[in-house]
Amino acid sequence: MSDIKSVLQSAGFKFDKRLGQNFITDANLLRAIVADSGISEGSTVVEIGAGAGTLTREIARVAGRVISYEVDESLRTVLDITLAGTGNVELRFYDILERELEEEEKSFGGQYYFIANLPYYITTPLITAFLENSTLLKSMTVMVQKEVADRLCARPGGKDYGSLTLAVDYRGGAKIVRHVSRAMFYPMPNVDSAVVRIDIDRGKYAVKDEALFIKLCRAAFSMRRKTLLNNILASFDISREDALDAIRQAGFAADIRGEKLSAADFARLANILFYVIRKE
């Protein structure tokens, strides 16, 4: 494959800042990301953001099938060059977030891996959408800005800990597997990045009502400076006495803040609230 900078220039490609387009150019890094993902021959991989196709091509060397989504139609010419000779890549030029994930998954043919170099503006909604709505996802290996990686892998009580951390922990386990310098991208962004791998475990926590659990987690961080009690009262139609009793039944102090609770703690509290709400 030709040097990616030369390919982009020869194709007359213009970067769109709105799309956060920063392409990986280092071949060793591309191979390392694929190795980090744990895919093997025969794996089906979904990639969000084909970009210039450098990561797509490296995934295709290992995977059995690659389904890659790209919203920028002007990259077609570039991808024709960079993906030439790969017979196992299907490009879909539309935004997957505008489609029903359940319908998209029907075309994947079974369980799949998710690999992507994600632009900042789409990172949180994309990860959340797949975690909450996918039934076939095995793992996600994503390149994200370092601050987002810290949020994905944060521990209770830290400044980076929040509802996104809980969404990840509830459905599996996340770890930073690689730190990446901004110099590895073209054009070079203003921040460093990291590769995070999230392995899915849908039976990690037993909750009686998943929607209630998700609502509780989001409520707990809706007003970060307020206590968990006040945030529950602002989001649920229950009395102060019942909310306080539920918090105490779960083993927490009346003035505890949501940032101190783990996913297991929220699962326990959600199961108590389940019966409180049914009683109301």
Image (tube, rainbow, N blue to C red):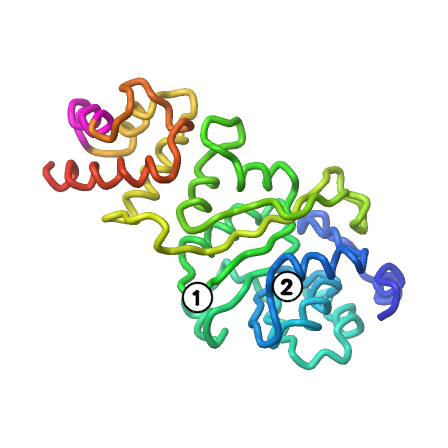
| Residue type pointed to by label 1 | Leu
Q: Residue furthest top?
A: 255
Is most of the magenta stretch helix, strand or loop?
helix
Element assignment for label 2: loop
Q: Does 145 appear above or below 242?
A: below
- Name the image quarter holding residue 148: top right
Residue contact between numbered discs 2 and 1, judged by CB atoms under 8 Å: no
Quadrant where the image shows the N terminus:
bottom right
**Image quarter hosting the C terminus:** top left
Task: Give the residue pinned by disc 1.
Answer: 136
The label nearer to you, 2 versus 1, is 1
Element marked by disc 1: loop
Where residue 104 appears, x then y in whole percent? 47, 69
**Distance from the alpha carbon under mark 2 to that under mark 1:** 21 Å
Q: 3 or 28, which lies in front?
A: 28
Residue 192 appears at what percent x and percent y?
Answer: 72, 40
Q: Find residue 154 and report its horizontal and vertical position in percent.
A: 52, 35
Residue 165 shows which numbered tag?
none
Q: Residue at x 71, y 61 (%)?
A: 51
From the image, tell me which residue sits under label 2: 70
Q: Which residues are the magenta region? A: 238-248
For badge 2, the amino acid type reads Glu
The answer to which image quadrant residue 92 occupies is bottom right
Q: Is 22 a magenta residue?
A: no
Point out the tag, 2 or 1, that comes first from the N-terminus.
Answer: 2
Closer-to-camera residue (112/4): 112
